[in-house]
Image (cartoon, rainbow, N blue to C red):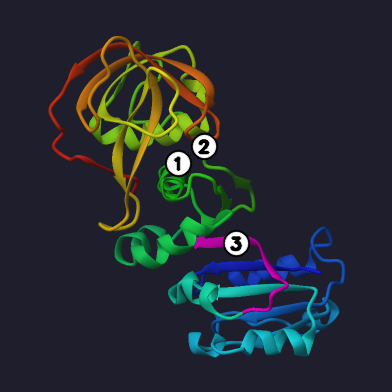
Amino acid sequence: MSVPVYIVAGFLGSGKTKFVTDMLTDKGFSEGERTLLLCCEEGEEEYDPELLKSANTVLVNLEEPKQMAGKRLIRLNREYKPERVIVEYNATWLLETLYAAEKPEEWELAQIIDLVDANTFELYLKNMRKYMADGLKEADLVLFNRCGPGHTKSAWRRAVKGLNSATRVFFENLDGTTDDGVSDEDLPFDVKADPIEIGDEDFGTFYLDALEHPDRYDGKRIHARGRAFRMEDMPKNCFVFGRHVMTCCAEDIGGIGFLCQYKGEPPKTNDWVYLDAKVEKSFSPIHGTDAIILIQDKLTPAEPPKEELVYFN
């Protein structure tokens, strides 16, 4: 029988203890399962012993990463025989430390939730990017809390989606409401223009927005500068129109783009081009989901832009 493992990650003060407490008291999530709660830091809040008892939960504090070494987790599993495991995880330990720890065979990762304090997000992303990006890149759910009127949710959402396009992102506001941060008004280009002019510095925003909202671009035309890429098993008469992107650090560079149907001679791999194209919402074989397909109207050679890499922050 598998034992689901839930990881609740984030920096000190990001609200992990409160979130785990809500998990334990949520009747839709907890039905008295025997729970092992591993707390990987000494936080600002403490768990109520009576709550843990009523939730059939045993708390084990791990004060430093080396306490997960050896067969510690296997011994804890043997001692407490949990039906599920919740890990309150310190973001500065990095998830690779937990992944590398020897664990019982029946433990199975169920979900990673990354909690972010809206008041410190930009500061940490700028000065502690390696640690902030670690959880964002792995999370199934990213939850920003303590969001106020002046916080730039859409920009933050794009930054997170740039690191992890598959994750879900939600924002918890000071008034108790929750939203997904999606906004049409703050896009840096006019989606009503014909064609939509995608500036070099806005390619990353266009890419993420078109992935999330292909309907917004269906039937419209775009003009943009990008590179031509080739991939294995592409449909006939197609190339990938895109850019190189740095998601985390200089060592973490990859490619982004959309399938483009060309006319005449295809561009050479890695050539810079200006593309005028019609946009169609369609299943994208390179993304494995509905996205957009570009249909070439005009293709002309281009010089590289001043900044060749795309950044999502």
Determine the residue positioned at 62% across, 48% down. Answer: 178
Amino acid type, mark 1: Ser
Q: Is residue 104 above or below residue 109?
A: below
Amino acid type, mark 3: Ile
Q: Is residue 30 left or right of residue 41?
A: right
The label nearer to you, 3 versus 2, is 3
Query: Which segment did they paint magenta?
Result: 103-117
The residue identified by callout 1 is: 154
The residue identified by callout 3 is: 112
Q: Residues within 10 Å of mark 2 (few under 14, many from 20)?
A: some
The residue identified by callout 2 is: 182
Q: Is residue 182 above or below residue 299?
A: below
Q: Distance between the residues labelled 3 and 1?
A: 22 Å
The quarter of the picture where residue 2 lies is bottom right
Q: In this view, does 232 lie to the left or right of 13?
A: left
Instruction: Identify which residue, 289 or 32, lies in the foreground.
Output: 289
Q: Is residue 10 left or right of residue 230?
A: right
The quarter of the picture where residue 111 lies is bottom right
Query: N-terminal of the two: label 3 or label 1?
Result: 3
